[in-house]
Amino acid sequence: MEEDSSAMEPNRLREAEAAAGELKRLREAGQSQYMYRSIADARVVGGRVCLFAVVSEIGATVHSRGTDFTVTLRVIDESYKSGISVTFFADSTALLPCVKSCGDVISLHNVVIKKYRDFFVQFDKKYSSFALFEGKTYTECSPYQTSIRYHDSEHDKDFLNQMRTWLPQGLKDFTSNNSELYLMNLKSDSTFDLVCKVFHVHVENNNSIFYVWDGTDTPAAEFPAMMYDSRIANRVRRRPMASIPSSVTDVEYEDAGYASLMKSLTHHDVTHKLRTLVRVVAAHPCEASLLSTGNCHLRLTLEDPTARIHAYVHKNDLVGFFGGGFLTAEVIVKKMNMVLGIPEPQGSVEVAPSTRNPPWIWCCLMSYYMDKNDPWVSRKYRIYSTAIRD
């Protein structure tokens, strides 16, 4: 049967007071002794305790709201593997703990247990102290960093060996995956320590991006030969992966192969024809009254995943582009809304749509130039043999 947590609080508080009294008695006797407690037993609000634990998470050092610098570590032991956070405050970053790696051991003296949503440990710079030890069993027992007020105890070595013995079983993730790594051995979805230089910090929307380098080259990006070889070998599969061709348009050359806009822009000939799959993202002019006269060119802005271009419907091709027959304002508005992805109005009152989603349509394009002395710069695109369905 589980004990009632409310009944355990007074017992833990009495234990903390007894430990503090014993510590005071030993100090008065001139003995440097500290009564270390497990994290599970130390979780008493207001209690001042000493802990020997393993560092499982290392936070970033930041400037506090006041004049201090602060860093938060998460520590665990065999009694409480979910861990408890420890918040440090100091006048400078040099006085804060600088943990070499997750899995290192920390000794904490005279820290205070507090609670805000959950229990946490607060390190008071006036009377608390700490020492950091490497977690590896073959390393020395002396700490690699200590705070100013830290005094060791004759039993520290026993607690350290106990932590190091438990560490391989209790912290497998941190001892195996959280090791130091070079960028040249970088793998996705892995946790590791990195010693590197910071060349630039970009801050945007309270988020920081660090540009770092450790002197090695990162591995080349790998791409599945199937998400490339099969697509390049099959013309149909070269079309945009996210596109589903709609039935909005008809083209005369349905058996012709597919070519992307970038393929056309980099074609070795200035003048050529192609069949492509695109979206119409803009049109000019868009007034039905101008287009219904049949006395102006229509410029459409076309895009696919590779490029965006302007393409013209010549005034002599307007009738065919809008499906043939007599051009009326109603027909032009309806069909332009179709290719621009403008939804049909709901009800008798027309309201401007908040969003639109142009469909992917097949289109035949012809490239040509305006100036034979400078064909590449004067190159333009014209839509032909393409009609919007009813």
Image (cartoon, rainbow, N blue to C red):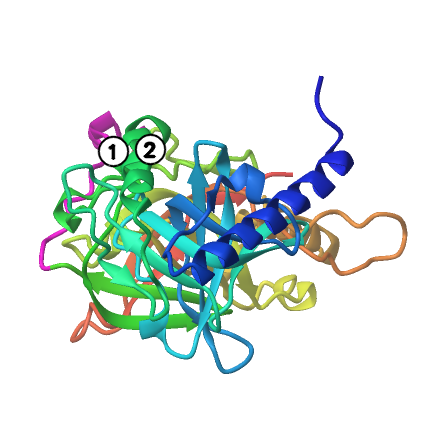
Q: Residues within 10 Å of mark 1 (few under 14, many from 20)?
A: few
Residue at image mark 2:
173
Q: Nearer the viewer, residue 215 or 129?
A: 129
Q: Secondary structure at mark 1?
A: helix
Which residue sits furthest front?
29
Give the residue at x 67% y 46%.
13
Which residue sits furthest bottom?
67
The reply to whether dot 1 and dot 2 touch (C-beta < 8 Å) is: yes
**Mark 1: amino acid:** Ser
Say if residue 233 shows up in the picture: no
Mark 1–mark 2 Cα distance, whole angstroms, equals 6 Å
Give the residue at x 23% y 36%.
223
Q: Is residue 81 left or right of residue 331?
A: left
Q: Point out the image quarter for the C terminus.
A: top right
Q: Nearer the viewer, residue 113 or 271?
A: 113
Q: Residue 29: x percent and y percent?
A: 42, 59
Q: Nearer the viewer, residue 175 or 242?
A: 175
45 shown above or below 309: above
88 shown above or below 250: below
Q: Residue 253: x percent and y percent?
A: 37, 35
Q: Residue 365: x percent and y percent?
A: 36, 50
Q: Nearer the viewer, residue 293 or 201?
A: 201
Say if residue 359 shows up in the picture: yes
Q: Residue 92: x percent and y percent?
A: 37, 78
Q: Is residue 339 left or right of residue 199?
A: right
Give the residue at x 16% y 75%.
373
**Mark 2: amino acid:** Asp
Q: Which residues are magenta?
A: 215-238
Res 46 quadrant in image: bottom right
128 shown above or below 134: below
Is 236 magenta? The answer is: yes
Residue at image mark 1:
176
